[in-house]
C-alpha cells in the first residue's frame, strides 16, 4: 500500500459481547426474520453496457474470452427478470409474507413491472446501487453520483424513496459517510458482523446498521462449500431459526435473521421449493415473525432506549 492513507470506519470486535440487550420485538417474539430479494438482473457487468468485461455470477465458473459476449451468463440473469422474480413474487404474496427487495436501479429501469409489483404488494425497497458493481472500485465522487442516480430512479419507479442501502458485497470506505451526508436513510446493511441492529457514529451522528448475512443466503449454491440440493438450503435456514429460538428461550436475548435470495437462483423451480418450505415452517412458529427491513429499522429506532444495556460503553454503541 506504500504511503497510502488507510481511511474508513474503525473495526469493532466487541459489539454487544456477552451482554445482549433485552430486545423486545413486536408481539413479544424472540426472532424476527427478514427476507431480502436481491433484484440485479440487467444491472450486472456486461460488454453491452460498456464495462469491457462480463459478469461471473452465472451458474458456471467458466469465463468467456475477454472482449466477447457471454450469452450464457446474460441469459442466466435474464431468467431472474423474466421468470424467477415472478415465481418468488407469487410465493410470497400467496403466503402473505412481507419481504424487502434490494433493487439495482438499472434493473428496475429495464423491467418496470417489478417496481410496480414492489409498490402494489406493499413490500419495501432497499437501494442496491445504480448498477450491480463494486463501490470499492469507485472514487468518492463516482460513488456519490451513483447514489444520487439510483435514488432518483428507484423513487420515480416505485413511488418509494429507499430508506436503507447496501452495495455489491464490497462497500467502499466512503459508503456510510455518503449515506449520512445525503440524509434520509434509516440504516445501511453492508455489514455482516452481528445478529442484531446496532448504532455507529459517523461524523458525530448516530447511524443504524442492520447486518446482512452471507450464510443464510442462496449464494451458497455457487460458493464452496455449496448446497448440493435445495434441501440443504432449507435445512440451513431451519437450523438457524431453531438455534436462535433456543437461545432466546434460554434467556440469551432476542435476535434478528436475514435471509438473502436472488431471483436468478432461488427463482428456479427446484430451489424455490426450499424457500416455500422455509416460509411454511416459520409461519407455523409462534415465536418468530416475518418483517420488512424498514419495519425492523423503525422499531429499533423507536424502542432501542427501552432495552439499553446498563453500563455499555458509549463509544461502542452510540445512541441516537
Image (tube, rainbow, N blue to C red):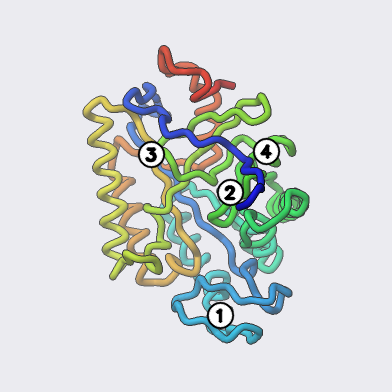
Question: Mark 3 sits on what residue?
Answer: 289
Q: Earlier in the sequence, mark 4 or mark 3?
A: 4
Q: Secondary structure at mark 4?
A: helix
Locate residue 77, reporting x and y percent. 55, 73
Determine the image quadrant of residue 257: top left
Viewer-side residue, 224 vs 286: 224
Residue at (64, 66) in percent of width and height: 43
Q: Nearer the viewer, mark 3 or mark 2?
A: 2
Locate residue 299, reporting x and y percent. 51, 29
Q: Secondary structure at mark 3?
A: strand
Discs 1, 4 touching: Cβ within 8 Å: no
The answer for how far apart the CA atoms under marks 1 and 4 are is 36 Å
Q: Earlier in the sequence, mark 2 or mark 4?
A: 2
Viewer-side residue, 80 vs 47: 47
Q: Is residue 116 shown to the viewer in this render?
A: no
For disc 3, the neighbor class at 10 Å (few under 14, some 14 to 19, many from 20) is: many
Does 276 appear above or below 20? below
Question: Mark 2 sits on what residue?
Answer: 166
The answer for how far apart the CA atoms under marks 3 and 2 are is 23 Å
Q: Earlier in the sequence, mark 2 or mark 1?
A: 1
Question: Mark 4 sits on what residue?
Answer: 177
Q: Earlier in the sequence, mark 1 or mark 3?
A: 1
The answer for how far apart the CA atoms under marks 1 and 3 are is 36 Å
Discs 2, 1 touching: Cβ within 8 Å: no
Residue at (73, 74) in percent of width and height: 50
The answer for how far apart the CA atoms under marks 2 and 4 are is 13 Å
Discs 4, 3 touching: Cβ within 8 Å: no
The answer for how far apart the CA atoms under marks 2 and 1 are is 25 Å
Discs 2, 4 touching: Cβ within 8 Å: no
Question: Mark 1 sits on what residue?
Answer: 75
Amino acid at each position: 500500500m506504500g504511503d497510502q492513507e488507510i481511511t474508513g470506519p474503525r473495526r469493532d470486535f466487541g459489539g454487544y459481547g456477552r451482554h445482549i440487550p433485552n430486545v423486545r420485538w413486536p408481539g413479544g417474539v424472540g426472532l424476527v426474520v427478514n427476507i431480502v430479494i436481491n433484484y440485479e438482473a440487467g444491472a450486472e457487468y456486461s460488454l453491452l453496457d460498456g464495462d469491457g468485461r462480463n459478469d461471473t455470477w452465472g451458474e458456471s465458473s467458466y469465463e468467456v474470452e475477454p472482449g466477447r459476449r457471454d450469452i450464457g451468463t446474460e441469459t442466466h440473469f435474464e431468467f431472474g427478470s423474466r421468470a424467477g422474480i415472478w415465481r418468488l413474487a407469487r410465493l410470497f404474496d400467496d403466503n402473505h409474507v412481507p419481504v424487502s427487495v434490494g433493487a439495482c436501479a438499472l434493473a428496475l429501469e429495464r423491467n418496470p413491472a417489478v417496481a410496480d409489483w414492489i409498490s402494489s404488494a406493499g413490500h419495501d425497497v432497499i437501494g442496491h446501487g445504480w448498477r450491480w458493481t463494486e463501490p470499492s472500485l469507485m472514487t468518492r465522487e463516482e460513488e456519490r453520483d451513483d447514489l444520487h442516480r439510483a435514488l432518483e430512479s428507484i423513487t420515480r419507479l416505485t413511488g418509494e424513496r429507499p430508506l436503507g442501502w447496501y452495495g455489491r458485497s464490497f462497500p467502499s470506505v466512503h459508503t456510510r459517510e455518503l449515506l449520512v451526508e445525503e440524509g434520509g436513510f434509516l440504516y445501511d446493511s453492508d455489514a455482516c458482523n452481528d445478529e442484531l441492529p446496532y448504532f455507529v457514529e459517523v461524523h458525530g451522528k448516530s447511524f443504524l446498521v442492520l447486518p446482512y448475512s452471507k450464510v443464510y443466503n442462496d449464494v451458497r449454491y455457487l460458493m464452496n462449500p455449496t448446497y448440493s440440493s435445495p434441501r440443504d438450503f432449507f435445512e440451513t435456514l431451519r437450523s438457524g431459526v431453531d438455534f436462535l429460538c433456543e437461545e432466546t428461550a434460554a434467556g440469551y436475548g432476542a435476535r434478528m435473521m436475514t435471509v438473502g435470495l436472488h431471483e436468478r437462483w432461488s427463482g428456479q423451480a427446484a430451489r424455490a421449493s426450499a424457500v416455500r418450505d422455509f416460509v411454511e415452517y416459520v409461519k407455523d412458529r409462534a415465536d418468530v415473525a416475518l418483517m420488512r427491513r424498514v419495519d425492523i429499522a423503525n422499531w429499533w429506532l423507536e424502542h432501542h432506549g427501552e432495552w439499553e444495556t446498563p453500563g455499555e460503553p458509549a463509544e461502542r454503541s452510540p445512541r441516537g
